[in-house]
Image (cartoon, grey):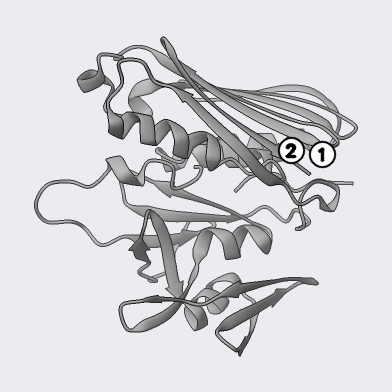
Amino acid sequence: MKKRFFSLLAVCALVLGLMAPVGAVELPSVECNGVETGYVPRLLGGRSYLPAEETAALLGAELTLEGGRAKLYRGGESVVLPLTRVGEEECLPLRQAGTALGYQVGWDRESRRVLLVDLGLPAGGQSGKVWRLEETQVQAGWLTAAAKGWAEQLVAGVDPAWLLSAIPLTDGDTALELMAGAAKALEQPGAAVVTAGDTTLELWREGERSVLTLTVPAAALLPAETLGVKGKTVTLSVETGTEEARALVRLGNWQASARWTA
């Protein structure tokens, strides 16, 4: 039975706090399965939102509104989310809605695009588990406050129920290539290695235990030259078991970790 894993690594809208350019800002866009959709997401608190009706249309879902909440239904799966007012519109968080209905959702930092990929995997997460984030820890050393915040976002943005959420969508083509290879590898237990450009993904799975390790050039995720880590790599490991999941990210002499329980 296939298992549904991965929404970024961010993850994910994992580095939104570091990406704002100076001066004119190009409006973000949404791409689904490699096709530009024409939708323009609203950014609020580092997350992408769309009006409820647009969210349903984009995800191919039925929509019901009641009491400040929205229910989306697609292919036997459903999710109920509170409406969030962004400006004058009642919106839904695109990442949360998309991942709940079987999409891979991430952010391409360079092109300012939200990327959605429908991998055709069953929704609902690993064996139907619901993971609760218990704690995050950061040992940032010499890093700036912005980089420390980035580290926290990276590990906290991982979804243990969907391991491919560990894929950082700073380069859309690389991320999609990794997701496609990893999705095939997830169809059967054992070990697999997927590479795309300078990024390597190693996956091991047996029963309910899965271990994913991703190695990414630091320059693909953060201003490496400014922070003095040009040429270095970021390593993110995610391990899930029956009752507990952990994520650990390392770069040079700093690391960040997160722990979840089922």
Residue 199 percent location from the top left of the image: 50, 23
For label 1, count other residues whose C-alpha is less than 10 Å away and answer few (under 14), some (14-19) or many (20+).
some
Query: To which quarter of the image does residue 15 belong?
Result: top left
Mark pair 2, 1: CA separation = 5 Å
Mark 2 = which residue?
184
**Residue 36 versus residue 225 in the image, above or below:** below
Residue 8 seen in this snapshot: no
Mark sitting on residue 131: none
Q: Is residue 248 left or right of residue 253?
A: right
Looking at the rendered image, the quarter that the C terminus falls into is top right
For label 2, count other residues whose C-alpha is less than 10 Å away and answer few (under 14), some (14-19) or many (20+).
few
Under mark 2, the amino acid is: Lys
Q: Are marks 2 and 1 in contact (CB under 8 Å)?
A: yes
Residue at 73% x, 23% y is 192
**Residue 165 versus residue 202 in the image, above or below:** below
Mark 1 = which residue?
187
Under mark 1, the amino acid is: Glu
Label 1 secondary element: loop
Residue 163 percent location from the top left of the image: 67, 38
| 180 or 223: nearer the viewer | 223
Residue at 34% x, 44% y is 109
Residue 168 percent location from the top left of the image: 48, 36
**Residue 132 versus residue 200 in the image, above or below:** below
**Residue 227 versus residue 42 in the image, above or below:** above
Label 2 secondary element: helix
Query: To which quarter of the image does residue 239 belong?
Result: top right
Residue 223 percent location from the top left of the image: 26, 27
| 196 or 40: nearer the viewer | 40
